[in-house]
Image: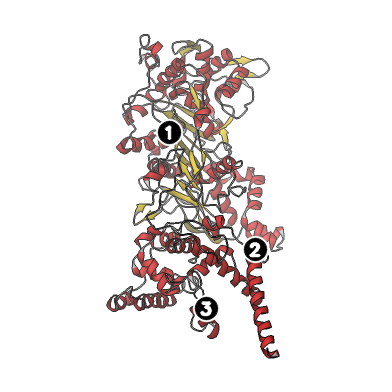
């Protein structure tokens, strides 16, 4: 053999062996980890987690900006999208096995001037491997890895599955990933409803999602869309006439990007994140890692009722503008900040303006000066957008913001503890601080009294008929309660009357008989987590508790003596629909008082809503039976109303974040300030028959009381005249018309994720699942390849 021939074969064989060696090294991870077959079956593309309401309505998502994607099955993608993609990106997609050698050779010899050679499968592999080096030498290695993964993908997935994986992974601009999110963002519809024009526009964006973004570059996007339509015509997906007509049409968007400020119940979803993290801290993924709500595509199913959520937000929005008007009209506000300069200074230094200017090296003196210069800005306002454009100094904007009255509302089933509505503030976009959760605590005032009276009834033998001394009580070492020794009403009253009219002196008498230490222990025994100070003034609510805890405590009344923790998660699924955590809240339900005591309290607390500090409430709502209690704290800093029916328990709080900002007039009390929110909500709930809340429902009479109780006896013990309570709850001056509901309709803050004006919902059969089964809905009968290959180029198993 000639020497030149030998050299040729040496070079050829050496080159061939070198290529084989490089491929093998790439396959075995020498140039970076390669995904396993299991990982290819369950690709770890970062995916947003989704939160669902109790009827399957999508409430919102948790995501990082680069991971805001929501997967969709092939069967749920419009044929127009598939045709546009294959026609434009890989017309021989159904003929090759992952690598199109004809296109690859064309790209090499023509240096890419007539398009690249990557198939859809290779593009998917590139995305899965997160590759795209600018170094040409290393890019060759990356290409080899992509070839290997492409072949693996083709051998383990159907063509349909590969297309779905690809469309779920790719970016569409504006930090929107995946065909479902792109479809929802640009057109407000699901991807199975995209028409040809819409599909062509989205697929056209894949070539350059910034250059061809129709919001930023209309002409370029228009031309690119028409290129896709032309490709569909060339590949016989459209007739010439159809293509001509479509190319002449303008681009029509229905753009609205879902962010973490919108969707249902934004305050609730923010609180939910912490609970999800706690629930999953001991749950491991198949690879041993921990779950992350921003990356792992979880589906969280909650107890929130979308209609009740909307009604709760409406209730806050319809009442608070009138209340804010009253708040802002108070003359003392002009000078209030002179006495609170330290707080104002702290808020100034906590602002983004201060921090940004500080980072830029500007002196404190110059920063302070800038806070007194008028600047155009947006601030919160009570209108449909919950904001307005204005010009004011940054310092005045801080005062303006702090003087906004906040509110919270929460509703739950008193038996199961399932939370159906949660409002944490007046506007999540502006005010992120949630006022309903377990950790946000305010002084509760007279709303504590029913719990004190309940203990007296359960452990001291008191009854609604028990006569109480309505006079200040002296506690050795602590002084008088009430401190001012001011009492109103008769010298002696029944316990039912004292509770209905929220009489402080009579409540101090009850505390004298129960004991401060014993009452503090009782609060602990009914599962209220906060440890309160052992002081006699507890009788008047001199302690800070959260709205969440107050509902937990009040659950013992309509809950027939059981303390039930509010709960709001039913189950959590992974991205494939497998249940990874199911919640059983029965362990959080504990009997703490007798059913007889709970029933007597329910009947006695009806006095508040009939003739007491919330007089007429039950009659206006037309409810057969309900109970409630108002609450107002020192200097009118906090206003509460807690109430319940046999089916629902709800509470609301109103106040400013700074406790020195108050509604100073004695005309304001819990019955006037907080109660209207509760009342509006129940009006809407009773009117909506689809919710199944029956205004004729009655509390269940315990068997041992059936023949011994007159159900109206507790109400009959209450004096008919509405006696003003000495903490200001009895009404004071003014009439309810002075503080009427706003005439302007302000919509709820929750904004549904829409699909042609309908709420996007998960399939009904995904909402109700047995714990023992995999909840992933079976795919359409797309023929699936079974078996796996053991070597890169080995034969795949027969079907």
SS for callout 1: helix
578 left or right, relative to 475: left
Residue 605 shows up from this direction: yes
Which residue is tagged 2? 28
Q: Quadrant of the C terminus?
A: bottom left
Q: Going from the N terminus, do you reach mark 2 or mark 3 first?
A: 2
Near-viewer residue (128 or 728): 128
Asked whether the beta carbons under mark 3 and mark 1 sit within 8 Å of each other, the answer is no
Which residue is tagged 3? 104
SS for callout 2: loop
Q: Going from the N terminus, do you reach mark 3 or mark 1 first?
A: 3
Which residue is tagged 1? 675
Against 553, residue 401 (above or below) is: below
238 left or right, relative to 422: left
Asked whether the beta carbons under mark 2 and mark 3 sit within 8 Å of each other, the answer is no
Question: Measured from the top left, where is residue 368 in percent x and y?
Answer: 66, 57
Q: Residues within 10 Å of mark 1 (few under 14, many from 20)?
A: many
Question: Which residue shows up at 29% across the image and 76% down it?
Answer: 239
Q: Quadrant of the N terminus?
A: bottom right
Question: Measured from the top left, where is residue 421 in percent x and y?
Answer: 44, 39
Q: CA distance from mark 2 to mark 1?
A: 68 Å
Question: Measured from the top left, where is residue 363 in percent x and y?
Answer: 72, 61
408 left or right, relative to 373: left
Pair 2/1: label in front: 2
Pair 2/3: label in front: 2
78 left or right, relative to 330: left
Question: Which residue shows up at 37% across the image and 37% down it?
Answer: 680
Identify the image quadrant of residue 764.
Answer: top left
Identify the image quadrant of residue 335.
Answer: top right
Q: CA distance from mark 3 to mark 1?
A: 72 Å
SS for callout 3: helix
């Amino acid at each position: 053999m000639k020497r030149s021939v030998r050299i040729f074969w040496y070079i050829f064989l050496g080159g061939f062996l070198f290529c084989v060696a490089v491929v093998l090294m790439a396959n075995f991870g020498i140039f970076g980890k390669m995904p396993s077959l299991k990982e290819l079956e369950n690709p770890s593309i970062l995916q947003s987690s989704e939160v669902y309401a109790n009827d399957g309505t999508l409430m919102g998502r948790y995501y990082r900006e680069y991971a805001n994607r929501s997967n969709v099955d092939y069967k749920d993608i419009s044929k127009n999208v598939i045709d546009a993609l294959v026609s434009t990106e890989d017309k021989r997609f159904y003929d090759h096995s992952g690598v199109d050698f004809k296109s690859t050779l064309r790209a090499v010899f023509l240096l890419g001037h007539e398009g690249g050679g990557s198939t859809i499968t290779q593009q998917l592999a590139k995305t899965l491997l997160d590759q795209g080096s600018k170094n040409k030498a290393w890019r060759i290695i990356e290409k080899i890895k992509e070839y290997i993964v492409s072949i693996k993908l083709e051998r383990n997935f159907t063509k349909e599955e590969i297309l779905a994986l690809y469309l779920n992974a790719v970016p569409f601009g504006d930090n929107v990933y995946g065909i479902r999110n792109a479809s929802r963002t640009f057109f407000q519809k699901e991807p199975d409803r995209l028409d040809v024009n819409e599909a062509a526009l989205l697929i056209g964006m894949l070539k350059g999602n910034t250059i061809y973004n129709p919001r930023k570059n209309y002409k370029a996007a228009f031309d690119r869309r028409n290129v896709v339509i032309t490709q569909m015509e060339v590949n016989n997906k459209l007739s010439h006439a159809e293509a001509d007509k479509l190319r002449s049409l303008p681009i029509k968007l229905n753009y609205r990007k879902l962010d973490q400020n919108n969707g249902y119940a934004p305050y609730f979803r923010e609180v939910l994140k912490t609970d999800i993290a706690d629930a999953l801290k001991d749950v491991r993924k198949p690879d041993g890692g921990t779950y992350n709500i921003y990356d792992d595509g979880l589906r969280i199913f909650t107890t929130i009722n979308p209609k009740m959520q909307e009604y709760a937000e409406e209730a806050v929005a319809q009442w608070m503008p009138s209340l804010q008007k009253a708040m802002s009209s108070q003359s003392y506000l002009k000078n209030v900040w002179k006495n609170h300069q330290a707080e104002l200074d702290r808020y100034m230094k906590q602002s983004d303006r201060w921090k940004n200017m500080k980072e830029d090296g500007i002196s404190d003196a110059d920063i302070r000066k800038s806070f007194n210069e008028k600047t155009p800005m947006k601030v919160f306002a009570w209108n449909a957008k919950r904001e307005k454009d204005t010009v004011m100094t940054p310092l005045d904007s801080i005062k303006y913001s702090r003087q906004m009255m906040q509110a919270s509302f929460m509703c739950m089933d008193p038996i199961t503890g399932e939370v159906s509505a949660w409002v944490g503030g007046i506007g999540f976009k502006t005010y992120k601080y949630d006022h309903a959760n377990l950790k946000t605590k305010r002084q509760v005032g007279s709303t504590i009294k029913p719990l004190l009276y309940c203990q007296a009834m359960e452990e001291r033998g008191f009854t609604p008929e028990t006569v109480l001394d309505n006079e200040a009580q002296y506690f050795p070492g602590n002084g008088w309660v009430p401190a001012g020794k001011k009492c109103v009403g008769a010298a002696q009253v029944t316990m039912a009357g004292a509770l209905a009219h929220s009489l402080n002196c009579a409540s101090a008498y009850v505390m004298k008989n129960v004991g401060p230490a014993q009452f503090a222990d009782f609060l602990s025994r009914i599962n209220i987590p906060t440890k309160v100070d052992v002081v006699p003034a507890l009788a008047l609510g001199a302690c800070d508790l959260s709205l969440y805890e107050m509902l937990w405590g009040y659950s013992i009344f309509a809950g027939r003596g059981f303390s039930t923790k509010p709960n709001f998660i039913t189950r959590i699924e992974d991205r494939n629909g497998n249940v990874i955590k199911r919640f059983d809240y029965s362990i959080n339900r504990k009997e703490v008082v007798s059913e007889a005591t709970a029933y007597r309290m329910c009947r006695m607390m009806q006095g508040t809503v009939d003739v007491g500090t919330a007089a007429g409430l039950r009659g206006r709502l037309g409810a057969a039976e309900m109970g409630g209690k108002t609450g107002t704290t020192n200097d009118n800093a906090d206003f509460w109303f807690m109430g319940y029916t046999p089916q629902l328990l709800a509470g609301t709080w109103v106040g400013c974040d700074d406790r020195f900002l108050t509604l100073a007039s004695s005309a304001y009390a819990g019955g006037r300030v907080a109660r209207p929110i509760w009342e509006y909500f129940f009006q809407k709930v009773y009117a909506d028959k689809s919710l199944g809340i029956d205004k004729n429902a009655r509390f269940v009479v315990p068997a041992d009381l059936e023949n011994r109780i007159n159900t109206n006896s507790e109400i009959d013990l209450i004096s008919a005249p509405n006696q003003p309570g000495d903490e200001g709850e009895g009404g004071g001056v003014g009439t309810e018309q002075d503080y009427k509901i706003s005439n302007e309709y302000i919509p709820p803050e929750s904004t549904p994720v829409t699909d042609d004006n309908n709420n996007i919902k998960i399939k009904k059969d995904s909402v109700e699942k047995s714990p023992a089964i995999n909840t992933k809905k079976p795919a359409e009968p797309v023929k699936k390849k079974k078996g796996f290959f053991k070597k890169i180029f080995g034969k795949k198993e027969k079907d």
